[in-house]
Image (cartoon, rainbow, N blue to C red):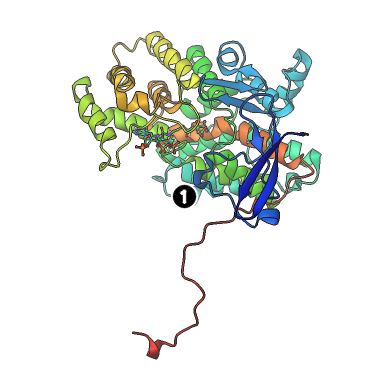
Amino acid sequence: MTDRKATLTFDDKTLELPIYSPTLGPDVLDIRKLYAEGDVFTHDPGFTSTSACESTITFIDGEKGELLHRGYPIDQLAADSHYLEVCYLLLYGELPTRAQMEDFESRVIRHTMLHDQMVYFYRGFRRDAHPMAIIVGVMGAMSAFYHDSTDITDPWQREVASIRLIAKMPTIVAWAYKYSIGQPFVYPNNKLDYASNFLNMCFSVPAEEYKVNPILARAMDRIFTLHADHEQNASTSTVRLASSSGANPFACIAAGAACLWGPAHGGANQACLEMLREIGSVDRIPEFIARAKDKNDPFRLMGFGHRVYKNFDPRAKVMKQSADEVLDLLGIEDNPTLQVAKELEAQAIADPYFSEKKLFPNVDFYSGIILEAMGFPTSMFTPIFALSRTVGWISQWHEQLSDPAHKIGRPRQLYTGAPHRDYVPVDQRG
Ligand code: SDX
């Protein structure tokens, strides 16, 4: 793999660490032998400088603001591809031929329904449960219903589990929404495309005819594509760590969804729209920018900043164009939330605090505006992110299990607690 080496010298030790060069991105130092040979750990809370795995799925160039899926730029995929084709690309590594796409689509279509017993699982939740609470529960419960695709050592069962998760997530998410608003579940209609099927399950009711608006279906499909995968983010790393113990696919993906829910990650789209609503008008923007800059104020601009992007998040650019198009096509003039978002973006990126820290809008900054215009409540924003990201989690899960060298993830620590001490009986304590 390499003949380049880094030399690490400390105390009376000199270690040679292999250096590997990737197809794209920074070189990596292989420190796997560091503890055995040097009796030291590296220390990198938050993994700001740590490569946790080798992958061929997604590459992000944070400086350039570039995102590639199997080498294809996200802006081209968002413009010219569609979500199920991107699913195929992420899962199998190449764009499908027409025949391969038809076969993949027919395999997904055959798995859109849930085991009918799962309806009772939903009924166990309060109606006011956050849809993410329901989704995390239902995804984990899938291992109780689909035993024949839980053996991770069987490539065929891994394939079936992957198709089941991609196919069933729109139904799981739509039913969580219907349950939260007290409307009856709408079953999947396999005559509809993936995005239209989801919108139909969310917004149609048995009492009336419902025709999916093709503009919204296209926008929905694009939102799915923009969220499909994103290298080793927190939720994907959670899926990889859960998978490293040999847990079944449904448990691993449910763990990823639980992690995504956090407001610093996939929960930011809901937090961002709530922030934009709280700002309310452009004249209050300076007040919120001042708060975001104030070290003593925990407030942050939601939808802004990113661990990797130190330039524009390319997904935010596409999302911003899509927001303009969708609102315009829906005839929603001067949407106040969109006006506040655009002015907030302009003022923030012109402010030295944000430009020096290289803080730009991320994928979550504009997505909520489109989803709100489509009729979704803010509580559905992260569930839609989870639906979209399921294929990314699954692809990364597959890749890890296909690596014969993979082992259980087990980080160490910098221990600064009490040194060894003997137990003190209670009547001898101070
Ligand atoms: C997603 O990883 C992925 O790929 C995630 C994701 C995906 O597709 O999977 O892209 C999806 O999670 C996007 C991010 C959504 N989260 C938000 O929008 C929440 C708001 N953003 C932040 O909390 C923050 O920017 C993070 C969590 C996204 C990134 O945090 P980092 O990389 O740990 O950076 P940091 O917290 O160390 O911040 C660096 C500096 C700090 O100031 P100093 O202590 O150096 O003085 O920038 C400041 C921060 O205070 N800062 C912000 C800010 N984000 C960072 N200040 C104000 N507003 C912000 N949003």
Residue at left offset 58%, top offset 49%: 42
Residue to which mark 1 is pinned: 125
Label 1 residue near ligand 1, CB within 8 Å: no
Q: Is residue 64 left or right of residue 13?
A: left
Identify the image quadrant of the N terminus.
top right
Q: Quadrant of ligand 1?
A: top left
Identify the image quadrant of the C terminus.
bottom left
Tally of numbered discs: 1
Figure check: 328 above or below 128? above
At which x and y percent is residue 273? 34, 29
Q: Is residue 344 left or right of residue 90?
A: left
At which x and y percent is residue 242? 63, 49
Res 117 visible: no
The residue lying furthest to the left in this view is: 283
Residues 290 and 172: in front is 290
Q: Amino acid at mark 1?
A: Phe
Residue at left offset 65%, top offset 50%: 409
Residue at left offset 68%, top offset 28%: 22
At which x and y percent is residue 180? 42, 40
